[in-house]
Structures are given as C-alpha cells and as structure tokens.
C-alpha cells in the first residue's frame, strides 16, 4: 500500500440541527485540517460518505435511513430500491452516483482493486437527539448526548478531538503519517 491517506480519514459526517455546534465544529475542523460533509435530511448520505466520526440527529436522518445505516454496519445487503446514493461534489453540491461508482471511488481511496466488505465509516458515532428507544450501532464507539444539555457542544468537540487523535495514531501505525 502506498502512503496515500484515504480521503475519509479526516472527514466528519454531520447531520444535526444545532447552529452553535455547527459553528464550533466548523471552526474546529478548519483548525485541525478536517473536512465536514453535511448530510442531506432523509438521504442515504450516511452510508455513502466515509468518515472517522459521524455526528447525527436521528430525527434528521429519518427512521428508514437510520435502519439502512444499521444494516450497512452489520454488513447486511442494502436494498437496491433506494432512489440513489448521493455524494458531495467539490463545489459543495450533492450529486447522485451509482453503487458501482461509489465502490470504484472507495477502492481508489483505499488503494485496492476490490472493495469487499470494507467499511470506511467504522470509528465513532455521536448521537445528539432525545430518542431513547432506537437500537444503537453495536460495532462502533457510540456516544449519546442530550441536545438540551448545555454541555453537549463541549462534550461533542472533546469527543471529536479524541477520535482525531486515535485516527492519527492508527494512520501512524499503518505508515500513512509520521
């Protein structure tokens, strides 16, 4: 494997509606050389976009997309009847891509010819909502914050910082960075 760092390594997937957190996270990402991809409500962006951390409000994600996300994490087949998979283009607009295009781009990112069972959003999931009765991902580090708690923004930023340090350590161990 070459020393090309996969693009998702420093990507944060975000889909929440807290303007103060959005501002603070945007500032943090700029200071720490990270990219934020903002998910489109009720879209499958969460399975189409890789990242070292996901910050989600399941109200905005929608029940169907959240269930799809859990299936994806469990390695189950994702139903083909989904309208489309979207990604964010360089100009910030969402564009629809096929599953084959998505797999090809992911293969290029990780430097291999075939992507079989590779998940590139397998690190930390931060949930910010008041939903108590939904399953949480079992194969991730999951943090849950109540959006009404005034400490949530600080806790989320702290968790993202720790996740970034862990990602740096992993990339260093695998020879991507020094």
Image (tube, helix red, strand yellow):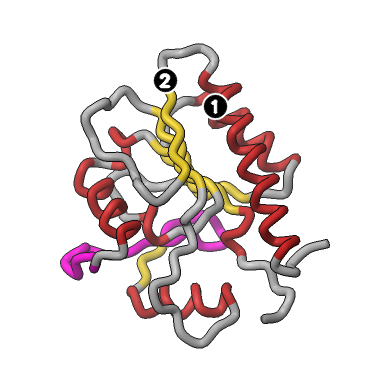
Disc 2 from disc 1: Cα separation: 10 Å
Between discs 2 and 1, the one toward the N terminus:
1
**Which contiguous range is marked in magenta?**
77-94
In the visual, does 3 lie left or right of 67?
Answer: right
| Dot label at residue 147 | 2
Q: Position of residue 121 (x, y in %)?
A: 47, 56
Residue farthest left in this picture: 81
Is 77 drawn above or below residue 157 in the view shown?
A: below
What is the secondary structure assignment of the residue under circle 2?
loop
Q: Is residue 92 magenta?
A: yes
Q: Position of residue 112 (x, y in %)?
A: 55, 83
Q: Is residue 155 magenta?
A: no
Q: Quadrant of the N terminus?
A: bottom right
Residue at image location 37% in from the left, 47% down from the top: 40
Residue farthest right in this picture: 178
Residue at image location 45% in from the left, 58% down from the top: 49
Mark 2 Cα-neighbour bin, 10 Å: few <14, some 14–19, many ≥20:
some
| Dot label at residue 21 | 1
Residue at image location 49% in from the left, 47% down from the top: 13
Is 66 drawn above or below residue 59 in the view shown?
A: below
Residue at image location 45% in from the left, 42% down from the top: 125
* Quadrant in the rendering for residue 32: top right
Q: Position of residue 30 (x, y in %)?
A: 71, 42
* Quadrant in the rendering for residue 7: bottom right
Mark 1 Cα-neighbour bin, 10 Å: few <14, some 14–19, many ≥20:
some
Q: Main secondary structure of the magenta part?
A: loop
In the visual, does 78 lie left or right of 142?
Answer: left
Q: Position of residue 146 (x, y in %)?
A: 40, 20
* Quadrant in the rendering for residue 8: bottom right
């Amino acid at each position: 494997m070459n020393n090309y760092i996969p693009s998702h390594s420093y990507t944060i997937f975000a889909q929440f509606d807290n303007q103060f957190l959005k501002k603070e996270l945007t500032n943090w990402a700029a200071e720490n050389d990270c990219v934020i991809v903002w998910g489109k409500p009720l879209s499958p962006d969460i399975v189409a976009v890789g990242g070292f951390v996901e910050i989600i409000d399941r109200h905005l994600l929608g029940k169907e997309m959240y269930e799809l996300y859990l299936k994806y994490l469990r390695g189950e087949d994702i139903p083909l009847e989904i309208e489309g998979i979207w990604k964010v283009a360089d100009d910030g607009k969402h564009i629809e891509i096929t599953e084959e295009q998505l797999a090809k781009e992911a293969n290029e990112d990780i430097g291999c010819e075939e992507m079989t069972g590779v998940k590139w959003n397998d690190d930390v999931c931060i949930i910010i909502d008041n939903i108590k009765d939904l399953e949480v991902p079992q194969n991730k580090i999951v943090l849950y914050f109540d959006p009404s708690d005034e400490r949530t923004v600080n806790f989320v930023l702290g968790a993202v910082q720790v996740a970034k340090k862990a990602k740096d350590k992993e990339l260093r161990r695998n020879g991507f960075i020094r």
